Amino acid sequence: MNDLAMAKPTHKAGFDVTAARRDFPILGQQINDKPLVYLDNGASAQKPIAVLDAMDRYYRQMHSNVHRGAHTLGDRATSAFEGARETVRAFVNAGSTEEIIWTRGTTEAINLVANGLAGRLKPGDEILVSQMEHHANIVPWQMIAERTGAKVVPVQITPEGELDLDSFNSLLGDKTKILALTHVSNVLGTINPVAALIEQVKARGVFTLIDGAQAVPHFQPDVQALGCDFYAFSSHKLFGPTGIGVLYGRKQLLEEMPPYQGGGEMIERVSFERTTWNVLPYKFEAGTPAVAEAVGLGAAIEYLNGFDRAAMEAAENRLLERANELVETVPGMEIIGTAKQKVPVMSFKIEGLHPSDIGTLLDQQGIAIRTGHHCAMPLMDFYGVPGTARASFAFYNTVEEVEQLFTALQKVQRLFA
Protein backbone atom coordinates (compact mmCIF):
# COMPACT_ATOMS: atom_id res chain seq x y z
CA MET A 1 0.00 0.00 0.00
CA ASN A 2 1.47 3.36 -0.97
CA ASP A 3 1.41 6.58 1.03
CA LEU A 4 -1.60 7.92 -0.83
CA ALA A 5 -3.71 4.84 -0.11
CA MET A 6 -7.19 5.71 1.10
CA ALA A 7 -10.24 3.63 1.92
CA LYS A 8 -11.60 2.40 -1.38
CA PRO A 9 -15.20 3.40 -2.11
CA THR A 10 -17.30 0.28 -2.27
CA HIS A 11 -20.85 -0.33 -3.39
CA LYS A 12 -23.05 -3.30 -2.76
CA ALA A 13 -23.62 -6.01 -5.34
CA GLY A 14 -25.90 -4.79 -8.07
CA PHE A 15 -25.98 -1.15 -9.06
CA ASP A 16 -27.65 1.80 -7.35
CA VAL A 17 -27.50 4.85 -9.58
CA THR A 18 -28.81 7.16 -6.84
CA ALA A 19 -25.91 6.20 -4.58
CA ALA A 20 -23.43 6.56 -7.44
CA ARG A 21 -24.66 10.06 -8.29
CA ARG A 22 -23.89 11.23 -4.76
CA ASP A 23 -20.21 10.62 -5.56
CA PHE A 24 -20.28 13.33 -8.28
CA PRO A 25 -20.88 16.78 -6.76
CA ILE A 26 -21.02 18.55 -10.12
CA LEU A 27 -24.22 16.72 -11.03
CA GLY A 28 -26.16 18.45 -8.26
CA GLN A 29 -26.10 21.92 -9.79
CA GLN A 30 -28.59 23.79 -11.96
CA ILE A 31 -27.95 25.14 -15.45
CA ASN A 32 -30.25 27.87 -16.73
CA ASP A 33 -32.45 27.28 -13.66
CA LYS A 34 -32.86 23.63 -14.59
CA PRO A 35 -31.29 20.55 -12.97
CA LEU A 36 -28.17 19.61 -14.92
CA VAL A 37 -28.55 16.61 -17.23
CA TYR A 38 -25.00 15.87 -18.34
CA LEU A 39 -24.98 13.78 -21.54
CA ASP A 40 -21.59 14.75 -22.96
CA ASN A 41 -19.61 11.97 -21.32
CA GLY A 42 -18.01 10.87 -24.58
CA ALA A 43 -16.17 14.19 -24.68
CA SER A 44 -15.18 14.20 -21.00
CA ALA A 45 -16.69 12.39 -18.05
CA GLN A 46 -17.25 13.92 -14.61
CA LYS A 47 -15.03 13.20 -11.59
CA PRO A 48 -16.05 11.46 -8.36
CA ILE A 49 -15.16 12.76 -4.91
CA ALA A 50 -12.60 9.95 -4.59
CA VAL A 51 -10.55 11.48 -7.43
CA LEU A 52 -10.88 15.04 -6.13
CA ASP A 53 -9.85 13.94 -2.63
CA ALA A 54 -6.88 11.90 -3.85
CA MET A 55 -5.45 14.81 -5.83
CA ASP A 56 -6.14 17.27 -3.02
CA ARG A 57 -4.39 14.98 -0.51
CA TYR A 58 -1.42 14.60 -2.83
CA TYR A 59 -0.94 18.36 -3.11
CA ARG A 60 -1.55 19.01 0.59
CA GLN A 61 0.58 16.22 2.02
CA MET A 62 3.20 14.91 -0.34
CA HIS A 63 3.83 17.02 -3.44
CA SER A 64 7.37 16.66 -4.74
CA ASN A 65 9.12 15.60 -7.89
CA VAL A 66 9.38 11.85 -8.32
CA HIS A 67 12.34 9.48 -8.55
CA ARG A 68 14.81 12.22 -7.62
CA GLY A 69 14.28 13.62 -4.15
CA ALA A 70 16.42 12.27 -1.30
CA HIS A 71 13.70 13.16 1.20
CA THR A 72 10.42 11.90 2.62
CA LEU A 73 8.10 13.92 0.37
CA GLY A 74 9.95 12.64 -2.71
CA ASP A 75 9.56 9.09 -1.48
CA ARG A 76 5.85 9.59 -0.82
CA ALA A 77 5.22 11.16 -4.23
CA THR A 78 7.17 8.44 -6.01
CA SER A 79 5.27 5.73 -4.13
CA ALA A 80 1.92 7.28 -5.05
CA PHE A 81 2.97 7.84 -8.68
CA GLU A 82 4.25 4.31 -9.22
CA GLY A 83 1.33 2.89 -7.26
CA ALA A 84 -0.99 4.50 -9.80
CA ARG A 85 1.00 2.90 -12.61
CA GLU A 86 0.46 -0.51 -11.00
CA THR A 87 -3.27 0.23 -10.73
CA VAL A 88 -3.36 0.96 -14.46
CA ARG A 89 -1.35 -2.17 -15.22
CA ALA A 90 -3.87 -4.31 -13.37
CA PHE A 91 -6.79 -2.49 -15.03
CA VAL A 92 -5.63 -3.44 -18.54
CA ASN A 93 -3.94 -6.70 -17.46
CA ALA A 94 -0.53 -5.76 -18.83
CA GLY A 95 2.28 -8.17 -18.01
CA SER A 96 4.45 -5.54 -16.32
CA THR A 97 4.47 -1.89 -15.29
CA GLU A 98 7.35 -1.54 -17.76
CA GLU A 99 4.65 -1.71 -20.45
CA ILE A 100 2.65 1.23 -19.02
CA ILE A 101 3.75 4.61 -20.38
CA TRP A 102 2.29 7.86 -19.06
CA THR A 103 1.29 10.29 -21.82
CA ARG A 104 -0.77 13.46 -21.99
CA GLY A 105 -3.66 11.50 -23.47
CA THR A 106 -4.68 9.16 -26.27
CA THR A 107 -3.53 11.62 -28.92
CA GLU A 108 0.02 11.81 -27.64
CA ALA A 109 0.10 8.03 -27.17
CA ILE A 110 -0.80 7.46 -30.83
CA ASN A 111 1.76 10.04 -31.96
CA LEU A 112 4.38 8.27 -29.85
CA VAL A 113 3.64 4.94 -31.53
CA ALA A 114 3.46 6.44 -35.02
CA ASN A 115 6.86 8.06 -34.62
CA GLY A 116 8.29 4.96 -33.01
CA LEU A 117 7.21 2.73 -35.89
CA ALA A 118 8.14 5.18 -38.66
CA GLY A 119 11.56 3.61 -39.08
CA ARG A 120 9.92 0.32 -39.98
CA LEU A 121 8.00 1.81 -42.90
CA LYS A 122 9.15 2.23 -46.47
CA PRO A 123 7.55 3.67 -49.63
CA GLY A 124 4.50 1.67 -50.67
CA ASP A 125 3.77 0.23 -47.21
CA GLU A 126 0.18 0.58 -46.02
CA ILE A 127 -1.40 1.62 -42.74
CA LEU A 128 -5.00 0.45 -42.34
CA VAL A 129 -7.41 2.67 -40.42
CA SER A 130 -11.21 2.68 -40.48
CA GLN A 131 -13.65 5.30 -41.71
CA MET A 132 -14.95 5.69 -38.16
CA GLU A 133 -11.66 6.82 -36.61
CA HIS A 134 -11.20 9.93 -34.53
CA HIS A 135 -8.81 12.42 -36.15
CA ALA A 136 -6.24 11.44 -33.50
CA ASN A 137 -6.01 8.01 -35.10
CA ILE A 138 -5.80 9.36 -38.66
CA VAL A 139 -3.65 12.50 -38.70
CA PRO A 140 -0.53 11.08 -36.97
CA TRP A 141 -0.45 8.24 -39.47
CA GLN A 142 -0.86 10.66 -42.38
CA MET A 143 2.10 12.66 -41.09
CA ILE A 144 4.24 9.53 -40.80
CA ALA A 145 3.09 8.32 -44.22
CA GLU A 146 4.13 11.61 -45.80
CA ARG A 147 7.53 11.31 -44.17
CA THR A 148 8.16 7.68 -45.13
CA GLY A 149 6.32 7.25 -48.42
CA ALA A 150 3.80 4.89 -46.85
CA LYS A 151 0.07 5.17 -47.48
CA VAL A 152 -2.93 5.45 -45.15
CA VAL A 153 -5.72 3.19 -46.42
CA PRO A 154 -9.29 3.53 -45.04
CA VAL A 155 -11.32 0.42 -44.27
CA GLN A 156 -14.95 0.94 -45.26
CA ILE A 157 -17.89 0.74 -42.88
CA THR A 158 -21.51 -0.29 -43.44
CA PRO A 159 -24.47 2.12 -43.34
CA GLU A 160 -25.26 0.70 -39.89
CA GLY A 161 -21.87 1.87 -38.68
CA GLU A 162 -20.13 -1.49 -38.43
CA LEU A 163 -16.74 -2.32 -39.86
CA ASP A 164 -17.11 -3.80 -43.35
CA LEU A 165 -15.19 -7.05 -42.97
CA ASP A 166 -15.27 -7.69 -46.71
CA SER A 167 -13.53 -4.36 -47.22
CA PHE A 168 -11.04 -5.21 -44.50
CA ASN A 169 -10.20 -8.59 -46.01
CA SER A 170 -9.81 -7.13 -49.48
CA LEU A 171 -7.38 -4.46 -48.25
CA LEU A 172 -5.27 -6.69 -46.02
CA GLY A 173 -2.20 -7.75 -47.96
CA ASP A 174 1.56 -8.01 -48.11
CA LYS A 175 1.89 -4.21 -48.04
CA THR A 176 -0.08 -3.91 -44.79
CA LYS A 177 2.30 -3.02 -41.97
CA ILE A 178 0.11 -1.36 -39.33
CA LEU A 179 -3.53 -1.69 -38.27
CA ALA A 180 -4.72 1.32 -36.23
CA LEU A 181 -8.29 0.83 -35.10
CA THR A 182 -10.67 2.27 -32.56
CA HIS A 183 -12.07 -0.17 -30.03
CA VAL A 184 -15.26 1.92 -29.77
CA SER A 185 -16.37 4.70 -32.12
CA ASN A 186 -16.78 8.06 -30.41
CA VAL A 187 -19.60 8.98 -32.82
CA LEU A 188 -21.40 5.70 -33.44
CA GLY A 189 -20.77 3.82 -30.22
CA THR A 190 -19.85 0.78 -32.31
CA ILE A 191 -17.77 -1.85 -30.53
CA ASN A 192 -15.35 -3.23 -33.09
CA PRO A 193 -14.30 -6.92 -33.09
CA VAL A 194 -10.70 -5.97 -32.39
CA ALA A 195 -9.59 -9.30 -30.89
CA ALA A 196 -10.56 -11.25 -34.02
CA LEU A 197 -8.95 -8.69 -36.33
CA ILE A 198 -5.74 -8.63 -34.30
CA GLU A 199 -5.53 -12.40 -34.45
CA GLN A 200 -6.05 -12.26 -38.21
CA VAL A 201 -3.25 -9.76 -38.88
CA LYS A 202 -0.70 -11.05 -36.39
CA ALA A 203 0.13 -13.99 -38.63
CA ARG A 204 1.22 -11.43 -41.24
CA GLY A 205 3.50 -9.57 -38.85
CA VAL A 206 1.26 -6.48 -38.84
CA PHE A 207 1.65 -4.10 -35.89
CA THR A 208 -1.60 -3.27 -34.10
CA LEU A 209 -2.63 -0.15 -32.21
CA ILE A 210 -6.04 0.06 -30.56
CA ASP A 211 -7.56 3.42 -29.59
CA GLY A 212 -9.38 2.59 -26.36
CA ALA A 213 -10.41 6.12 -25.37
CA GLN A 214 -14.14 5.42 -25.75
CA ALA A 215 -13.97 1.82 -24.57
CA VAL A 216 -12.46 2.11 -21.10
CA PRO A 217 -15.31 4.17 -19.56
CA HIS A 218 -17.72 1.33 -20.33
CA PHE A 219 -15.77 -1.91 -19.96
CA GLN A 220 -12.37 -3.13 -18.84
CA PRO A 221 -9.96 -4.17 -21.62
CA ASP A 222 -7.54 -7.08 -21.34
CA VAL A 223 -4.55 -6.29 -23.52
CA GLN A 224 -3.09 -9.78 -23.20
CA ALA A 225 -6.35 -11.40 -24.27
CA LEU A 226 -6.70 -8.93 -27.15
CA GLY A 227 -3.13 -9.62 -28.26
CA CYS A 228 -2.56 -6.03 -29.41
CA ASP A 229 0.87 -4.45 -29.64
CA PHE A 230 -0.35 -1.08 -28.35
CA TYR A 231 -3.44 0.16 -26.52
CA ALA A 232 -4.06 3.85 -25.76
CA PHE A 233 -6.60 5.70 -23.63
CA SER A 234 -7.19 8.98 -21.78
CA SER A 235 -7.86 9.62 -18.11
CA HIS A 236 -10.49 12.32 -18.50
CA LYS A 237 -12.92 9.99 -20.25
CA LEU A 238 -12.35 7.41 -17.49
CA PHE A 239 -13.66 9.72 -14.72
CA GLY A 240 -10.12 10.89 -13.95
CA PRO A 241 -8.37 14.25 -14.45
CA THR A 242 -7.41 15.88 -17.72
CA GLY A 243 -3.83 16.10 -18.95
CA ILE A 244 -2.81 12.47 -18.61
CA GLY A 245 -3.29 9.26 -20.55
CA VAL A 246 -1.82 5.82 -20.95
CA LEU A 247 -0.02 3.88 -23.62
CA TYR A 248 0.27 0.15 -23.14
CA GLY A 249 2.99 -1.25 -25.36
CA ARG A 250 4.38 -4.73 -25.74
CA LYS A 251 7.71 -4.72 -23.92
CA GLN A 252 9.82 -6.04 -26.77
CA LEU A 253 8.54 -3.38 -29.16
CA LEU A 254 8.98 -0.58 -26.64
CA GLU A 255 12.57 -1.65 -26.09
CA GLU A 256 13.22 -1.59 -29.84
CA MET A 257 11.52 1.76 -30.50
CA PRO A 258 13.47 5.02 -30.26
CA PRO A 259 12.40 7.61 -27.65
CA TYR A 260 9.70 10.01 -28.72
CA GLN A 261 11.04 13.02 -26.79
CA GLY A 262 14.36 13.90 -25.22
CA GLY A 263 15.17 15.52 -21.89
CA GLY A 264 15.34 14.63 -18.25
CA GLU A 265 14.29 11.29 -16.73
CA MET A 266 14.36 9.41 -20.05
CA ILE A 267 18.15 9.21 -20.04
CA GLU A 268 20.66 6.87 -18.43
CA ARG A 269 23.77 8.95 -19.09
CA VAL A 270 24.39 12.15 -21.05
CA SER A 271 27.65 13.41 -22.45
CA PHE A 272 28.39 15.66 -25.41
CA GLU A 273 29.65 12.60 -27.25
CA ARG A 274 26.73 10.25 -26.59
CA THR A 275 23.48 9.81 -24.67
CA THR A 276 22.06 6.47 -23.55
CA TRP A 277 18.41 5.85 -22.69
CA ASN A 278 16.79 4.95 -19.42
CA VAL A 279 15.01 1.63 -18.89
CA LEU A 280 11.29 1.15 -19.53
CA PRO A 281 8.92 2.79 -18.93
CA TYR A 282 10.97 5.93 -18.24
CA LYS A 283 12.60 5.89 -21.66
CA PHE A 284 9.38 7.42 -23.03
CA GLU A 285 8.64 9.82 -20.14
CA ALA A 286 10.77 12.90 -20.67
CA GLY A 287 10.56 15.68 -18.13
CA THR A 288 8.62 16.18 -14.93
CA PRO A 289 5.50 14.01 -15.15
CA ALA A 290 1.90 14.86 -14.26
CA VAL A 291 2.16 13.28 -10.81
CA ALA A 292 -1.11 14.52 -9.33
CA GLU A 293 -2.95 13.56 -12.50
CA ALA A 294 -1.50 10.03 -12.39
CA VAL A 295 -2.65 9.77 -8.79
CA GLY A 296 -6.09 10.98 -9.85
CA LEU A 297 -6.32 8.41 -12.61
CA GLY A 298 -5.32 5.67 -10.21
CA ALA A 299 -8.04 6.83 -7.82
CA ALA A 300 -10.62 6.81 -10.64
CA ILE A 301 -9.81 3.20 -11.48
CA GLU A 302 -9.90 2.17 -7.82
CA TYR A 303 -13.29 3.90 -7.56
CA LEU A 304 -14.63 1.93 -10.51
CA ASN A 305 -13.24 -1.27 -9.01
CA GLY A 306 -15.59 -0.73 -6.08
CA PHE A 307 -18.62 -1.40 -8.28
CA ASP A 308 -20.23 -4.54 -9.59
CA ARG A 309 -19.02 -3.81 -13.12
CA ALA A 310 -21.43 -6.23 -14.82
CA ALA A 311 -24.38 -4.57 -13.10
CA MET A 312 -23.02 -1.14 -14.01
CA GLU A 313 -22.71 -2.10 -17.69
CA ALA A 314 -26.24 -3.51 -17.65
CA ALA A 315 -27.53 -0.23 -16.24
CA GLU A 316 -25.78 1.70 -19.03
CA ASN A 317 -27.28 -0.61 -21.63
CA ARG A 318 -30.76 0.07 -20.25
CA LEU A 319 -30.18 3.78 -20.85
CA LEU A 320 -29.48 3.15 -24.53
CA GLU A 321 -32.44 0.77 -24.81
CA ARG A 322 -34.76 3.41 -23.39
CA ALA A 323 -33.36 6.04 -25.73
CA ASN A 324 -33.95 3.76 -28.73
CA GLU A 325 -37.54 3.21 -27.61
CA LEU A 326 -38.19 6.96 -27.54
CA VAL A 327 -36.74 7.84 -30.95
CA GLU A 328 -40.12 7.49 -32.64
CA THR A 329 -41.58 10.15 -30.32
CA VAL A 330 -39.54 12.85 -32.08
CA PRO A 331 -40.72 13.36 -35.68
CA GLY A 332 -37.87 13.51 -38.18
CA MET A 333 -35.28 12.09 -35.80
CA GLU A 334 -32.76 9.66 -37.31
CA ILE A 335 -30.06 7.73 -35.46
CA ILE A 336 -26.60 7.69 -37.04
CA GLY A 337 -25.04 4.35 -36.20
CA THR A 338 -27.18 1.32 -35.43
CA ALA A 339 -24.55 -1.36 -34.90
CA LYS A 340 -25.62 -4.48 -33.03
CA GLN A 341 -22.79 -4.09 -30.53
CA LYS A 342 -22.72 -0.58 -29.05
CA VAL A 343 -21.86 1.36 -25.93
CA PRO A 344 -24.47 3.92 -24.78
CA VAL A 345 -23.77 6.61 -27.37
CA MET A 346 -26.50 8.05 -29.58
CA SER A 347 -25.64 10.32 -32.50
CA PHE A 348 -28.61 11.72 -34.33
CA LYS A 349 -30.04 14.33 -36.63
CA ILE A 350 -33.51 15.83 -36.82
CA GLU A 351 -34.92 16.78 -40.18
CA GLY A 352 -34.82 20.54 -40.74
CA LEU A 353 -32.69 21.30 -37.67
CA HIS A 354 -29.02 22.13 -37.47
CA PRO A 355 -27.13 20.20 -34.78
CA SER A 356 -25.81 23.38 -33.16
CA ASP A 357 -29.38 24.72 -32.79
CA ILE A 358 -30.38 21.48 -31.09
CA GLY A 359 -27.48 21.74 -28.68
CA THR A 360 -28.14 25.39 -27.83
CA LEU A 361 -31.84 24.85 -27.17
CA LEU A 362 -31.18 21.76 -25.07
CA ASP A 363 -28.69 23.73 -22.99
CA GLN A 364 -31.42 26.25 -22.22
CA GLN A 365 -33.26 23.32 -20.65
CA GLY A 366 -30.23 22.25 -18.61
CA ILE A 367 -29.23 19.39 -20.90
CA ALA A 368 -25.61 19.11 -22.08
CA ILE A 369 -24.90 17.21 -25.31
CA ARG A 370 -22.19 17.44 -27.99
CA THR A 371 -22.74 18.78 -31.52
CA GLY A 372 -20.53 19.04 -34.59
CA HIS A 373 -18.25 16.65 -36.46
CA HIS A 374 -16.83 15.12 -33.25
CA CYS A 375 -13.29 15.09 -34.69
CA ALA A 376 -14.46 12.54 -37.23
CA MET A 377 -14.85 14.45 -40.50
CA PRO A 378 -14.32 11.42 -42.78
CA LEU A 379 -17.19 9.69 -40.97
CA MET A 380 -19.42 12.73 -41.43
CA ASP A 381 -18.55 12.67 -45.14
CA PHE A 382 -19.55 9.00 -45.30
CA TYR A 383 -23.00 9.82 -43.93
CA GLY A 384 -23.29 13.01 -45.97
CA VAL A 385 -23.86 15.30 -42.99
CA PRO A 386 -21.90 18.31 -41.70
CA GLY A 387 -22.28 17.04 -38.15
CA THR A 388 -24.60 15.38 -35.68
CA ALA A 389 -25.96 15.86 -32.21
CA ARG A 390 -24.62 13.29 -29.77
CA ALA A 391 -25.88 12.15 -26.39
CA SER A 392 -23.33 9.96 -24.62
CA PHE A 393 -24.41 8.29 -21.40
CA ALA A 394 -22.43 7.25 -18.32
CA PHE A 395 -23.32 4.97 -15.42
CA TYR A 396 -24.42 7.97 -13.31
CA ASN A 397 -27.12 8.95 -15.79
CA THR A 398 -30.68 7.84 -15.13
CA VAL A 399 -33.59 6.60 -17.20
CA GLU A 400 -35.42 9.75 -16.10
CA GLU A 401 -32.67 11.87 -17.65
CA VAL A 402 -33.02 9.95 -20.91
CA GLU A 403 -36.73 10.71 -20.86
CA GLN A 404 -36.00 14.38 -20.08
CA LEU A 405 -33.77 14.49 -23.15
CA PHE A 406 -36.55 13.30 -25.41
CA THR A 407 -39.14 15.58 -23.84
CA ALA A 408 -36.77 18.45 -24.54
CA LEU A 409 -36.16 17.27 -28.12
CA GLN A 410 -39.90 17.20 -28.70
CA LYS A 411 -40.06 20.84 -27.59
CA VAL A 412 -37.21 21.75 -29.92
CA GLN A 413 -38.85 19.95 -32.83
CA ARG A 414 -42.21 21.66 -32.21
CA LEU A 415 -40.51 25.05 -31.95
CA PHE A 416 -38.97 24.73 -35.42
CA ALA A 417 -41.92 22.92 -36.97
Image (spheres, helix red, strand yellow):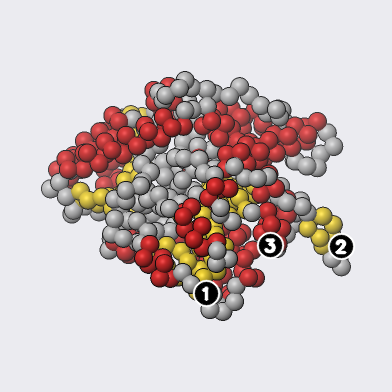
> Measuring 41% from the left and 35% from the top, which residue is drawn there?
313
SS at mark 3 in the image: loop
Q: Position of residue 400 (x, y in %)?
A: 28, 29
| Residue 70 image-quadrant placement | top right
Tell me which label, 1 or 3, sits earlier in the chain: 1
Q: Is residue 57 left or right of residue 344?
A: right
Label 3 and label 2: CA atoms lie apart by 21 Å
Q: Residue furthest left?
A: 417
Mark 3: few/some/many CA within 10 Å (<14, 14-19, 20+): some
Q: Is residue 48 left or right of residue 402?
A: right
- Identify the residue position indicated by label 1 in the image: 175
Question: Disc 3 marks which amino acid?
Answer: Met
- State the residue in front, 277 or 193: 193
Q: Is residue 116 visible?
A: yes
Whether pointer 3 and pointer 2 mark residues with C-beta atoms closer than 8 Å, the reply is no
Mark 1: few/some/many CA within 10 Å (<14, 14-19, 20+): some
Q: Position of residue 92 (x, y in %)?
A: 57, 43
- Identify the residue position indicated by label 3 in the image: 257
Q: Work out whether 298 lies above or below 352.
A: above
Q: Position of residue 305 (x, y in %)?
A: 53, 30
- Identify the residue position indicated by label 2 in the image: 271
Whether pointer 1 and pointer 3 mark residues with C-beta atoms closer than 8 Å, the reply is no
Question: Disc 1 marks which amino acid?
Answer: Lys
Instruction: Please identify, in this view, whether the residue under mark 1 or under mark 3 is nearer the observer.
Output: 1
Q: Work out whether 7 lies above or below 276.
A: above
Q: Position of residue 156 (x, y in %)?
A: 37, 65
